[in-house]
Image (spheres, rainbow, N blue to C red):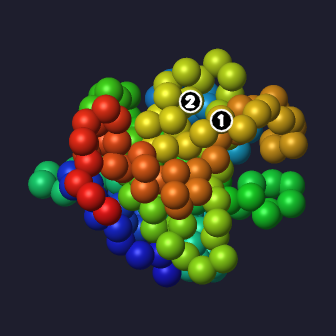
Amino acid sequence: MIPTLTSRRLRLRPWTVDDADAAFEIYKHEEVARWLSPAMDAVRDPQEMRLVLQHWVAESHRSVQPTGRWAVELTEENRVLGGMTLLYLPPGGTDLEIGWQLSPEFWGHGYATEAGHALAHWALEYPGIDEVFAVVRPTNARGAATAKRIGMEWVGETDKYYDLQLQVYRVRAADLDQSLADQQYGADQHRPPQ
């Protein structure tokens, strides 16, 4: 079973089938789904979303940590605003990918960065996990910017995943710690002695 993770404003928790209406409000948007294809298209109605969630819940019961799918909710409001994934990339299943999807109404508030940082930090504390990847389509400027804000570095382009030309970003524990320090203190500000 995947754990619940928390950050300053957010809670990342396992999806449930009861989240179908909230999840539909995220995954119905073409602006969200177009970056998920070929893995997933825009969801047409709440019933279809319920079927997707049933699959995700069953998958999470079979998954081996640290992989999983999380609902992202605002802690103070208990309102689902997005989803996060930590799954092995095809075809070889050796590279661990972090992914994020937020409803467009929540874009631009730093939620994807905050949730991504929390999930990447948790994954990199897991034994045997040394790095986490994000793959982004070259035209997805918002996704690339979020990967960088999480603390990921661009490592190149490849067509090895999903038979698509994708930009690859990677984060390691030391990179993530530096990214968090920069967010807390500003890249040019004095940091406390370590």
Q: Residue furthest left?
A: 76
Pinpoint residue 13: horizontal percent, then vertical percent.
36, 66
Q: CA distance from mark 2 to mark 1?
A: 9 Å
164 to the left or right of 176: right
Which amino acid is tagged 2? Ala
Give the total of numbered labels: 2
Residue at the image position 43 percent from the left and 50 percent from the top: 178
Relative height, residue 22 to residue 155 (above, below): below
CB under 8 Å between discs 2 and 1:
yes
Pinpoint residue 111: horizontal percent, then vertical percent.
32, 41
Judging by the rendered image, the residue that carries numbered circle 2 is: 144
Judging by the rendered image, the residue that carries numbered circle 1 is: 154
64 to the left or right of 13: right
Pinpoint residue 22: horizontal percent, then vertical percent.
33, 47
43 to the left or right of 180: right
> From this viewpoint, is residue 84 visible?
no
For disc 1, the neighbor class at 10 Å (few under 14, some 14 to 19, many from 20) is some
Q: Residue furthest front?
A: 193
Report which quarter residue 12 is drawn in: bottom left
**Dot 2 lies on which element?**
helix
Residue at the image position 63 percent from the left and 70 percent from the top: 129
The mark lying in front, picked from 2 and 1, is 1
Residue at the image position 55 percent from the left and 21 percent from the top: 141
Which amino acid is tagged 1? Trp
Residue at the image position 72 percent from the left and 38 percent from the top: 155
Q: Which quadrant does the C terminus fall into? A: bottom left
For disc 2, the neighbor class at 10 Å (few under 14, some 14 to 19, many from 20) is many
Q: Which mark is residue 102?
A: none
